[in-house]
Image (cartoon, coloured by chain):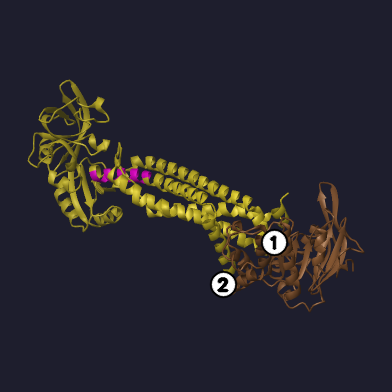
């Protein structure tokens, strides 16, 4: 049950996500296109990992499977010893609401809502009290540097600001892991830097686990690990310049 | 459950208040017009039927009419019968009449019409003809050589059947009347009435005394009209009359209005047809609005589902929007009906061959139309939003 899964999973360095033989094959008419092929790796609590690879390598497909936005053809995703792919659709929705945070490429905010309303929406859906979600929403926006933009609507904000609102929304329910799908693809370099530094700050200061898809090589300097994909499979990649504390993928 | 409801309401509220104002106003305006169309059509037909019924009661038969026993031509011992009828509480008027066919002639014109004889004072307690004299005067009890004519008989008063009239009899002129028992008399036309009901306007009236001298007997009648305090309880009165031992045929006005029943049925059918079409238009309108809304917000719906908002919350939010359109349209429609159209029609009733017709707004009909419109809105909101959440999340967010 999802409720069982909401218990504390473990401490830092414990495995948060265990991915085993994850395969996703798209069927287009009679043609079968393998987007992911037997991908196996672990994500530890507190990691800031980037999924990188060429266009069409399966980066976003992998993120969608892990974030329960798509159904893989086969494989397992374990959290706390439970294969979350076996959950029902409503349990998956509850899981996404309570345990995962999402940041998409195109901000994905509701235009009718203010920044604060966009942020507290998931908390409201979780049944938290008004006083609580207003306070937490405000705090989350302050955390991303938008304390002065609480009541602005998306169209009144820049792309970078909108993406920070999306990050605050992703944080409101205190998720175990934040999935970011090319979150800086539509931003200028200054906003890109701000967003990535924000992820880094959240990862370091709050211990938030972040899994980010990116195609920008320079983004590697912000992450603690890169998961390389090529043609839907994990690859080892040595000697990456400027990698710093980079950990090579493939367990 | 309550959380889901709160969130649905919140999303619907924001979508309505922060969405496109022009679309909102136009949608509610269309809904209000559809509601007005539904209620107005039913009300005008009901008003028409009501007018006919009132005409039958007020100008022809009263609420209840007593006819002779089977196989008898006249009601006998009318005086004591009237006393029995009068003893029933709630009876407000009685008028005994002889009804006889007669041939009228004036100069070279002639025609056949029915003559009713009345005691004018009694008749005034049952019918309203005395209030609708368009020329001359009403009968008085002592008149013996005078007659009043319905508008269709004399000619020159704009009757619907002018070509069958006497061609222009003036007040004070005489018409020759040949009763169907062979008695021939001349009567001075004392007055002409127009009750806006062709069937009543085809009658002529003389005094009871005069008719009894024509027939050669008294204390009899062809018809006794009874007026009661309220319409609709005729069967209760009839039961009481029967308990008093009245053996004559006692009939409620509805028997005489049977001739218009088919018309009323046809009106009901037309009203129903228009209502069904109106509801269909309302459903399609709301469906299109919600459908376009869900198509344009397809990605948003995907995002909401991706972040864990349950599908039923999203569907409910669209249903609430549809309900808001329908309820707002209904409220404005009710305002238009009760504060604009109904007062206007009271002041300016439509003139039909059966009389002046105003709107008859019946609460049950209004309730049915309101419920139907809201139900149609519910379905029209549900289907497109349900279709929208049937897509996979990825299809919704990134499309095909």
Q: Residue B130: where, in percent of width, then height?
A: 16, 42
Provide the chain ID for the residue under circle 2. A
Give the colour of chain A.
brown
User: Which quadrant of the rendered structure holds the N terminus of chain B?
Assistant: bottom right
Q: Residue furthest top?
A: B108
Q: Which residues are magenta?
A: B44-58
Are callouts 2 and 1 both on one chain?
no
Q: Nearer the viewer, residue A78 or A154?
A: A154
Q: Can residue B47 be found in the magenta stretch? A: yes
Where does label 2 land, which residue? A130
Give how far apart the Cα atoms at labels 2 and 1 are: 23 Å
Label 1 secondary element = helix
* B35 lies left or right of A142: left
Report whether residue A18 is seen: yes
Q: Residue B136: where, in percent of width, then height?
A: 12, 35
Q: Can residue B390 be found in the magenta stretch? A: no
Give the colour of chain B.
yellow
Report whether residue A73 is seen: no
- Secondary structure mostly taken by the magenta-highlighted segment of the chain: helix
Q: Nearer the viewer, residue B246 or A25?
A: A25
Q: Residue at x 82, y 64 (%)?
A: A220
Q: Nearer the viewer, residue B209 or A207?
A: A207
The numbered dot on residue B306 is 1
Q: Residue furthest front?
A: A190
The numbered dot on residue B262 is none
Give the quarter of the image for residue B37.
top left
Q: Residue B186: where, in percent of width, then height?
A: 11, 29
* B43 lies left or right of B322: left
Label 2 secondary element = helix
Can you say whether A77 is above or below B393 in the image?
A: below
How packed mark 1 is, by other alpha carbons closer than 10 Å (few <14, some 14-19, many 20 or more), is many
Provide the chain ID for the residue under circle 1. B
């Amino acid at each position: 049950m999802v409720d069982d899964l909401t218990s504390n999973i473990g401490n830092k360095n414990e495995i948060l996500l265990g991915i085993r033989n994850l395969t996703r094959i798209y069927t287009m008419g009679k043609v079968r296109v393998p987007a992911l092929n037997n991908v196996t790796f672990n994500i530890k609590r507190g990691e800031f990992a980037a999924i990188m690879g060429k266009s069409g390598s399966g980066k976003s497909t992998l993120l969608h499977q892990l974030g329960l936005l798509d159904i893989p053809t086969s494989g397992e995703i374990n959290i706390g010893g439970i294969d979350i792919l076996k959950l029902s659709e409503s349990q998956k929705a509850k899981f996404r609401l309570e345990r995962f945070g999402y940041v998409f490429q195109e901000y994905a905010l509701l235009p009718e809502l203010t920044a604060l309303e966009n942020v507290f929406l998931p908390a409201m859906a979780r049944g938290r009290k008004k006083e609580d979600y207003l306070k937490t929403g405000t705090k989350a926006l302050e955390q991303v540097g938008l304390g002065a933009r609480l009541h602005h609507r998306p169209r009144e904000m820049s792309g970078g600001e909108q993406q920070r609102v999306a990050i605050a929304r992703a944080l409101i329910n205190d998720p175990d892991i934040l999935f970011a799908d090319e979150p800086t693809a539509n931003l200028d370099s200054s906003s890109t830097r701000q967003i990535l530094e924000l992820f880094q700050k959240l990862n370091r200061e709050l211990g938030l686990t972040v899994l980010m898809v990116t195609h920008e090589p320079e983004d590697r300097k912000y992450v603690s690990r890169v998961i390389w994909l090529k043609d839907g499979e994990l690859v080892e990649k040595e000697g990456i310049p400027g990698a710093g504390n980079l950990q090579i993928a493939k367990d | 459950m309550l959380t889901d409801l709160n969130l649905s309401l919140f999303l619907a509220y924001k979508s309505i208040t922060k969405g496109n104002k022009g679309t909102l106003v136009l949608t509610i305006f269309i809904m209000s017009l559809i509601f007005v169309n539904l209620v107005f059509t039913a009300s005008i037909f009901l008003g028409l039927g009501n007018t006919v019924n009132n005409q039958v009661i007020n100008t022809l038969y009263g609420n209840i009419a007593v006819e002779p026993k089977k196989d008898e031509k006249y009601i006998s011992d009318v005086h004591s019968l009237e006393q029995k009828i009068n003893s029933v509480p709630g009876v407000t008027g009685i008028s005994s009449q002889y009804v006889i066919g007669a041939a009228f002639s004036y100069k070279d014109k002639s025609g056949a019409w029915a003559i009713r004889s009345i005691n004018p004072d009694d008749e005034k307690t049952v019918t309203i003809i005395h209030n609708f004299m368009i020329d001359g005067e009403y009968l008085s009890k002592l008149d013996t050589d005078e007659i009043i004519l319905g508008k269709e008989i004399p000619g020159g008063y704009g009757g619907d059947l002018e070509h069958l009239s006497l061609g222009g009899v003036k007040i004070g002129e005489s018409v020759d009347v040949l009763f169907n028992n062979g008695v021939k008399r001349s009567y001075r036309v004392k007055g002409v009435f127009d009750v806006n009901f062709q069937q009543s306007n085809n009658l002529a009236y003389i005094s009871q005394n005069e008719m009894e001298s024509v027939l050669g007997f008294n204390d009899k009648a062809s018809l006794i009209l009874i007026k009661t305090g309220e319409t609709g309880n005729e069967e209760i009165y009839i039961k009481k009359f029967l308990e008093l031992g009245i053996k004559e045929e006692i009939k409620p006005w509805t028997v005489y209005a049977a001739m218009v029943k088919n018309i009323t049925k046809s009106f009901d059918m037309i009203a129903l047809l228009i209502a069904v079409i109106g509801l269909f238009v309302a459903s399609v309108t709301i469906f299109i609005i919600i459908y376009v809304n869900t198509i344009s917000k397809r990605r948003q719906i995907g995002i909401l589902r991706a972040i864990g908002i349950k599908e039923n919350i999203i569907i409910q939010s669209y249903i609430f929007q549809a309900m808001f359109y329908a309820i707002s349209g209904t409220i404005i429609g009710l305002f238009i009906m009760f504060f604009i159209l109904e007062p206007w029609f009271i002041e300016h009733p439509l003139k039909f061959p059966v009389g002046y017709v105003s709107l008859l707004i019946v609460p049950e009909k209004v309730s049915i139309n309101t419920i139907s419109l809201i139900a149609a809105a519910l379905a029209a909101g549900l289907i497109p939003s349900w279709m929208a959440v049937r897509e996979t999340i990825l299809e919704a967010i990134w499309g095909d």
